[in-house]
Image (spheres, helix red, strand yellow):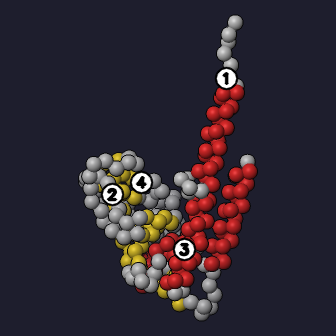
Amino acid sequence: AELEAELDCRKRQYEYYRNNLLSYEGNEVEWKTLGEVLDIYTGGEAPKNLIRGEKPQGSFIYPIYSNGEDIYGFTDNYRIDKDAVTISSIGAKTGTIYFRKAYFTPIIRLKVLVPKNEKTLNSRYVFHYLSNITISTKRSSVPNINANEVKSIKIPLPPLEEQQRIASILDKFDTLVNSISEGLPKEIVLRRKQYEYYREKLLTFTNDK
């Protein structure tokens, strides 16, 4: 309970810092559209050579991502060779932002954003900024967003050093509140397992006569 309360507190702190670090007004910084500073790709059909599941096998080592959070599968080649930000562009998760490490293949109309110039734009900064705004989507029978609509979204561009500083601060909070391998969520999982272990030990009795 104390860990969950701590996690809730850290989440609110994370949101506070993210809002403050990424809030710009007037002419404080230069603003550009995503289309001006990022190459934007759209995912297509799944590769013919693939395996389903969450673990690579043999030469099938490159992850395939669709609109959701989980890995769709693995293939023996890749389409994107740089760290990138993705935007789910169709279905219930439309507008959801993810960060993906280099060497992967996007499918099912997933939008992939790659900085045109890494000397002026930090991809983690892009991820945090887009995670902090609401991306408008078309409200039809199936929510969606097209490439031109993504390109028209504006982003503030402080100097690269400032982008890196902001990204570094927010990355630490992101790990603390979201990581299941390093942060508080991992600690909560471990304590729950420990609780279940001791509960079973303490409440297991043998029927000896």
- Sequence-wise, the earlier of marks 4 and 2 is 2
- Residue that badge 3 annotates: 167
Q: Are marks 1 and 4 in contact (CB under 8 Å)?
A: no
Q: Is residue 34 above or below residue 205?
A: below
Q: Dot 2, crowdedness within 10 Å: few (<14), some or many (≥20)?
A: many
Q: Give x and y (percent) for residue 115.
A: 41, 78
**As shown in the figure, which amino acid type bears the numbered disc 4?**
Ile
Would you name the residue on which mark 2 appears? 62
Could you say which quadrant of the image residue 16 lies in?
bottom right
Question: Relative to residue 32, is residue 55 drawn left or right?
Answer: left
Check if mark 4's residue and mark 3's residue have beta carbons within 8 Å.
Answer: no
* Mark 3 element type: helix
Q: Who's the residue at 68% across and 31% down the image? A: 199
Residues under labels 1 and 4: Cα distance?
39 Å
Relative height, residue 193 to residue 46 (above, below): above
Q: Amino acid at mark 3?
A: Ala
Query: Whole-percent x and y of residue 43?
Result: 35, 65
Tell me if residue 89 can be seen: no
Q: Quadrant of the C terminus?
A: top right
Cβ–Cβ under 8 Å for marks 4 and 2: no
Residue labelled with disc 1: 204
Disc 2, SS: strand
Query: Does label 2 or label 1 sit earlier along the sequence?
Result: 2
How far separated are the C-alphas under marks 4 and 3?
24 Å
Q: Which residue is mark 4?
A: 71
* Residue located at (38% from left, 77% from top): 39
SS class of the residue under badge 4? Answer: strand
Instruction: State the image quarter where residue 47 is shown.
Output: bottom left
- Identity, as a three-letter code, of the amino acid under mark 1: Thr
Residue for point 34% across, 50% down:
56
